[in-house]
Image (cartoon, rainbow, N blue to C red):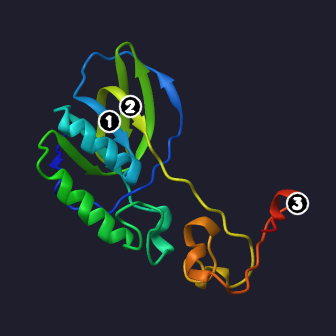
Amino acid sequence: MQTRPYNASLERSSISLNHIASRKTSRVHFDVIIVGAGSASLSAALVLGRCRRQVLVCDVGHPRNAASHAMHSYLTRDGITSGEFLQTARTQLRPYSTVTRLEDEATDVASFEGGFTVQLHDRGHYSCRKLLLATRVVDSLPRIPGIEQFYGRSVHHCPYYDGWESRDQPLAVYGRGIKGVVSH
């Protein structure tokens, strides 16, 4: 079981859980295991680190906003790249030696009396008293040939997040059924 202090490289933000099951165990290694490493996860790690809780952050690195040229709608961070955001988060987490990270995928979660066990793909299992699942949303692009080359540049999943940069320009909205029709 080798872990690294949080100041090791972190470029991760995705997970897949295969199933949740019940299992008996009594070893608790962490107060909290956080699955995912996006803004919500890292904010939670910061708060828990400040409270001197033993925290494990695990994630594999497929951030939702990887295609975007910048992050928006985060007060004091509007317009920075996701890489800059992660670097700032890592810098702010460095003083908290109780926060540890593993670059690995959680593949199974089991509950036991008093906590949870998280099975990681490559690094075995870890147990905790509390479990925080802060995994990303997955955007499914429509099956339109060539759309991938424009995603994050001129095709966006959220007009609120990226709309300002396209203001006063023609806008097309794609959707299915009545929920896909929006007029502003």
Percent coordinates x, y for residue 39 in the rendering: 38, 53
Mark 2 and mark 1 residues within 8 Å of each other at the beta carbon: yes
First in sequence, mark 1 or 3: give its number: 1
Cα distance in 3D space between marks 3 and 2: 37 Å
The amino acid on which the numbered mark 2 sits, given as a three-letter code, is Leu
Direction from residue 151 to residue 134 in the image, left or right? left
Mark 3 and mark 2 residues within 8 Å of each other at the beta carbon: no
Task: Point out which mark residue 33 bears.
Answer: 1
Q: Residues within 10 Å of mark 3 (few under 14, many from 20)?
A: few
The quadrant the N terminus occupies is top left
Circle 3 or circle 2, nearest the eye: 3
For label 3, the residue is: 177
Q: Can you tell which quarter of the image residue 138 is in?
A: bottom right
Cα distance in 3D space between marks 1 and 3: 40 Å
Q: Residues within 10 Å of mark 2 (few under 14, many from 20)?
A: many
The quadrant the C terminus occupies is bottom right
Percent coordinates x, y for residue 72 in the rendering: 47, 67
Residue 158 appears in the rendering: no
The amino acid on which the numbered mark 1 sits, given as a three-letter code, is Ile
First in sequence, mark 2 or 1: give its number: 1
- The foreground one among 78 and 146 is 78
Residue 62 appears in the rendering: yes
Quick one: SS at disc 1?
Answer: strand
